[in-house]
Image (cartoon, grey):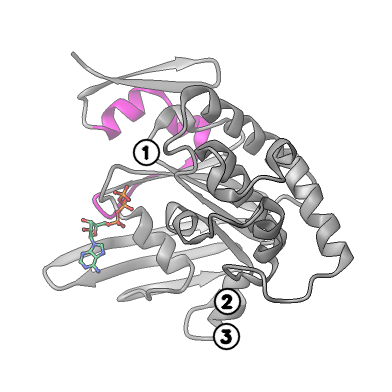
Amino acid sequence: MIIDADHVSWRRINKVVLKDVTWRVRSGEHWSLVGLNGSGKTTLLKMINGYIWPSSGTMSVLEMPFGEGDLRELRKKIGWVSSALESQLRAHELPEEIVLSGKFASIGLYEAVQPEDVERAKELLEMMHCLPFASRPYGTLSQGEKQRVLIARAMMASPELLILDEPCNGLDIFARERLLALIERFTESENAPTLIFVTHHVDEILPCFSHTLLLKEGAVYQSGLTADIMTPENMTAFYGGGVVVERHGGRLSMAIRS
Ligand SMILES: Nc1ncnc2c1ncn2[C@@H]1O[C@H](COP(=O)(O)OP(=O)(O)OP(=O)(O)O)[C@@H](O)[C@H]1O
């Protein structure tokens, strides 16, 4: 089991941020995690990474129950690509250095790298289509190019679980489709880690995400097979009826009902 959250709640003064969340992610599954602003997505991700603990219920990630084992060791097995990470990286570094630093989970490269690490970093840059700008400082890259470097960086540590936290934010429609196509190909590759793709846009949910968790106001609204959950009727109900959801091929699109 990759994630086993059993009746997890997280309470703050005057607020229950996560309410009785039960969520099981098994090896070989890829999940999309969908919810509006404030629905508890980031809180759940922080908990998966062991930065906060359940107020009640039990949580086990990569077979490590919370309260047992070394959280730093656990975090080495989890890649988390987010806008918070993007803003920490240094503008003058080259994509190759940024990818290599992923092996040590460091900002900047301080450790001696082995020739096989350099080889692996190059393979990952190629896989994420980063070679055309591999010799330019990170700070000069577009948002879409940066996202691809960040995913390559996360892969450098060979994680068992890879969280892509709103990776399409700030991308134009073409850059978004290119990134989604790369992510889709990536899920087909041998030894791909279990993926959790976080978004609030239904049109980003690819058929390769086998399962979907819908979060609403801190609680699980639904969880299960994407094919069952991502229907226009279901998603219209999830968003409270104020939207029009349509199917286009294997994906949905959504607009505000006028
Ligand atoms: N430490 C805290 N104390 C009190 N309330 C909190 C705390 N952390 C988060 N919250 C609240 O819990 C709710 C869920 O927050 P969270 O950041 O998990 O949502 P989210 O789904 O990630 O939203 P977004 O899509 O905007 O990033 C929000 O209303 C937030 O204000």
Q: From what the image shows, is residue 201 above or below residue 40?
A: above
Report the residue at 60% width, 71% height from top.
Answer: 106
Q: Please say if the residues under marks 1 and 3 sit with CB atoms less than 8 Å apart.
A: no
Give the percent coordinates (x, y) of residue 14.
11, 68
Task: Tell me which label, 1 or 3, sits earlier in the chain.
Answer: 3
* Among the two numbered marks 1 and 2 on one chain, the one whose residue lies closer to the N terminus: 2
Classify 75 as above or below 20. below
Q: Amino acid at mark 2?
A: Met
Q: Residue tagged by mark 2?
A: 64
The span from disc 1 to disc 3 (Cα, nearest Å) is 33 Å
Whether residue 255 appears in magenta in the rendering, the answer is: no
Label 2 to label 3, Cα distance in Å?
7 Å
Residue positioned 56% across, 79% down in the render: 72
- Does dot 2 land on a helix, a strand or a loop? strand
Q: Amino acid at mark 3?
A: Gly
Q: In the rendered structure, does residue 219 fall within the stretch colored magenta?
A: yes
User: Label 1 vs label 2: CA separation?
Assistant: 29 Å
Quarter containing the C terminus: top left
Mark toward the start of the polypeptide (2 vs 3): 2
Residue 76 sits in quarter: bottom right
Report the residue marked by disc 1.
200
Mark whose residue sits in front, 1 or 2: 1
Provide the residue designation for mark 3. 69
* Residue shown at 52% from the left, 59% from the top: 89
Quarter of the rendered structure image containing ligand 1: bottom left
Mark 1 sits near ligand 1, with its Cβ under 8 Å away: yes
Tell me where residue 110 appears, x and y as whole percent. 67, 75
Quarter of the N terminus within the rendering: bottom right
The magenta-colored residue range is 217-239
